[in-house]
Image: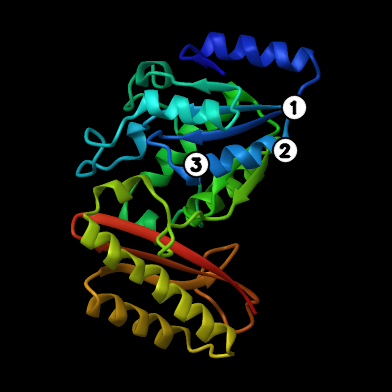
Amino acid sequence: MQSVSEIKSLRSQIKAWRQQGLSIAFVPTMGNLHNGHFSLVEKAKTLADKVVVSIFVNPMQFGASEDLDSYPRTLDEDKRGLANFGADLVFTPSVEAIYPNGLEAQSYVDVPGVSMGYCGGARPGHFKGVATVVTKLFNMVQPDFACFGEKDYQQLQVIKTMVRDLSIPIEIVGVPTQREVSGLAMSSRNGYLTSDEKDTAKILFQTLSNAAKTLESGNKDFAEIEQQAKTNLLENGLTPDYFAIANAITLKPAKLDDQQLVILAAAFLGKVRLIDNLQVSL
């Protein structure tokens, strides 16, 4: 597996692969990789001849009070894992390479509609940072496919909308959420949880599952289902940020005639903010 940090070196390798007629799949990450990330690499390998993975902790998507400085950085371990899972190239640019003029002078990409509310409401500017850095990485890698985890469901819809609206010739592939045995969605931030908190955290997935079963049974009292879920989370030691039933494509509040739904949830456990979701077909 190659490892490059300079944009020029990346583009040189991409050009060589293109001259050989090879296809490319891309997995953008912020590092501190776990099996959820590696499942994206495995999916990417089924789609294209070559797989590029980026590791870049993007300052633009962190708020002023968020954990940019303390975000786990495990580059050597990440590289070993990517090599084991068959990635062809890992791209590890510096902040200066991505934002040479600084964040204040950086042009940005803003995706209306699907970026509003939920995590977008709780973290102002977050999805602007995501959309901007992903657009820049797409321009650098120029892949045929790009793989994103469905755990960050709103992010996935933001990227899909951005690619469609800007006519970017890349197929966005959502990859199912990888879970612990308890059902807890795998996340880099799970490392902040104590063993007792991890046991409590599984309640989030259980609450989502119960809400999904209620919907599948034919109950469409969305407001009541959401309220019961929030109450259940509170009673079990989690503080809900949001718990919402939405149209799976637009992310607008679910309507009675919607057939494809997504249940979106975020909750605090101590200082850790957990997010998860379940898709429901009626």
Under mark 2, the amino acid is: Leu
Quarter occupied by residue 74: top left
> Which secondary structure lies at badge 2?
helix
Q: Is 34 placed above or below 59 here? A: below
* Residue at x 19% of width, y 44% of height: 65
* Left or right, 147 with reference to 29: right
Q: Position of residue 157 (x, y in %)?
A: 55, 53
Residue found at the very far right of the displayed protein: 21
Q: Nearer the viewer, residue 154 or 71?
A: 71
**Of the image marks 2 and 3, the number of the one nearer the N terminus:** 3
Which mark, residue 140? Answer: none
Q: CA distance from mark 2 to mark 3?
A: 16 Å
At label 3, the amino acid type is His
Dot in front, 1 or 3: 3
The picture places residue 71, in percent across and down from the top left corner, at 27, 37
State which tag comes first along the sequence, 1 or 3. 1
The reply to whether the C-beta atoms of the residues labelled 1 and 2 are less than 8 Å apart is yes
Q: Secondary structure at mark 1?
A: loop
Tell how many labels: 3
**Residue 265's image quarter?**
bottom left
Classify residue 165 as left or right of residue 227: right
Q: Position of residue 149 (x, y in %)?
A: 53, 49
Q: Residue at x 41, y 74 (%)?
A: 206
Location of mark 2 (residue): 47
In the rendered image, the vertical position of residue 36 relative to residue 234, given as above or below: above
Q: Which mark is residue 23?
A: 1
The residue under label 3 is 37
CA separation in Å, label 1 and label 2: 8 Å
The amino acid marked with disc number 1 is: Ser
Q: Is residue 247 left or right of residue 164?
A: left
